[in-house]
Amino acid sequence: PSFNEDPGMKEWRAFMAKYLPGADLSNVTYVYGYNASKAMEQVLKQCNGDFSRTNVLRQAENLHDFEVHTLLPGIKLNTSPTDHRPIKGLQLQRWDGRTWVRFGEVIEGVSA
């Protein structure tokens, strides 16, 4: 319920209504796929017309503070040639009996 009016979720629901009408919106794999497609779209934009394997990989390894609007605010995608994990942030939430309520700042993880 807390994300019903969220612009990113509205955008995702409109996408789903257009391309996958009748799909089960509670299936989180749809959101995951949408997020992955948004990241790939950004990679291809960064390619600037050079879609060689080498350049696609180079761009995929160079995402910097890219925001996918279906992720929580403050969670950004970042990659590098030595770190292919795009999501390193999380935000704690607690159940208030009705909905999930975020608290604290976004916490960034580190590579092992």
Image (cartoon, grey):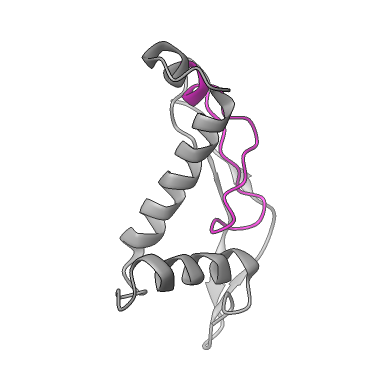
Q: Quadrant of residue 103?
A: bottom right
| Viewer-proximal residue among 34 and 106 | 34
Span colored in magenta: 58-79
The residue depicted at 49 percent of the width and 16 percent of the height is 58
Residue 101 rendering spot, x and y as whole percentages: 60, 73
The residue depicted at 52 percent of the width and 87 percent of the height is 97
Main SS of the magenta part reads: loop
Which quadrant holds the N terminus? bottom right
Q: Is residue 73 left or right of residue 12?
A: right
The residue depicted at 53 percent of the width and 20 percent of the height is 80
Residue 61 rendering spot, x and y as whole percentages: 49, 21
| Viewer-proximal residue among 83 and 13 | 13
Which quadrant holds the C terminus? top left
- Counting the numbered discs, the total is 0
| Viewer-proximal residue among 62 and 20 | 20
Is residue 35 on the magenta stretch?
no
The residue depicted at 47 percent of the width and 22 percent of the height is 83
Q: Name above or below for residue 54 compared with residue 45.
A: above
Q: Is residue 63 visible?
A: yes
